[in-house]
């Protein structure tokens, strides 16, 4: 705290020398006033009430060339793929982790993480949307699904059936059961 306070005092003293020439510039005076208030509030605010500093990643654990730790990806997977059993989520993490630590992927590591995060968050958003749907809306969706199945090839229908039976669609279990029921009833 002492170091921060010394910097603040030094900044204030330096800015005080600029006040007279800058008095005509109201924007600069406004910024100087804000800086003074920040310095004073920092010195008078108890340590436990201060906003904590942004936690830096553990640089020894991050994927090279990124600021993403493996624990962050695992948490993203566990939060986004709730419909999958834990062993399947672990498989996803292990596969992604292996690709990210592979030196051949060094140039695309950041893009891989970004792409995966976008898809995982989209799946999570869909999960939340399904969770907020009424039972009647879910039933209507299952009926529309049954109608759409009729237009698919036999091979595509079988793939859908396998996905539904194995619980691999990114939908909550109640929606999966409704879709499976619609699939079986076709």
Image: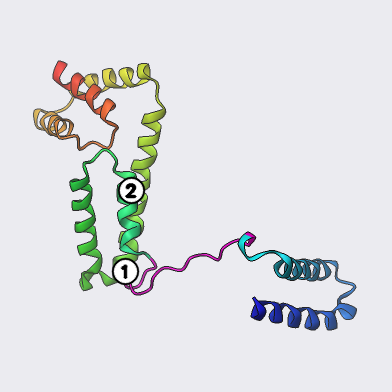
Where disc 2 sits, the SS reads: helix
Q: Which residue is mark 2?
A: 119
Q: Earlier in the sequence, mark 1 or mark 2?
A: 1
Tell me the CA gap for discs 1 and 2: 19 Å
Q: Is residue 107 left or right of residue 26?
A: left
- Where residue 171 appears, as percent x and y from the top left, is 29, 33
Q: Which quarter of the figure is the N terminus placed in?
A: bottom right
Q: Is the stretch drawn in magenta largely helix, strand or loop? A: loop
Q: Which residue is mark 1?
A: 63
- Where residue 129 appears, as percent x and y from the top left, is 40, 32
Q: Which quarter of the figure is the C terminus placed in?
A: top left
Identify the residue shown where x is 30% and y is 66%.
109
Q: Which mark is residue 116?
A: none
Is residue 149 positioned above or below 156 on the image? above
Q: Is residue 102 left or right of residue 126?
A: left
Is residue 95 positioned above or below 106 on the image? above
Number of numbered markers:
2
Q: Quadrant of residue 100?
A: bottom left
């Amino acid at each position: 705290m002492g170091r921060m306070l010394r910097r603040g005092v030094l900044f204030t003293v330096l800015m005080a020398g600029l006040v007279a020439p800058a008095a005509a510039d109201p924007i600069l005076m406004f910024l100087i006033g804000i800086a003074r208030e920040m310095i004073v509030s920092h010195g008078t605010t108890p340590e436990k009430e201060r906003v904590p500093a942004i936690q830096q990643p553990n640089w020894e654990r991050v994927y090279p060339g990124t600021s993403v730790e493996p624990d962050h990806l695992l948490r993203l997977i566990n939060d986004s793929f709730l419909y999958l059993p834990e062993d399947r989520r672990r498989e996803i993490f292990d596969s992604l982790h292996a690709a990210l630590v592979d030196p051949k992927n060094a140039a695309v590591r950041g893009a891989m993480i970004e792409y995966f995060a976008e898809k995982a968050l989209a799946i999570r958003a869909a999960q939340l949307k399904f969770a907020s749907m009424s039972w009647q809306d879910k039933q209507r969706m299952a009926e529309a699904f049954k109608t759409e199945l009729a237009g698919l090839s036999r091979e595509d229908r079988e793939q859908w059936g396998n996905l539904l039976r194995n619980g691999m669609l990114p939908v909550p279990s109640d929606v999966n059961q409704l879709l499976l029921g619609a699939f079986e009833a076709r």
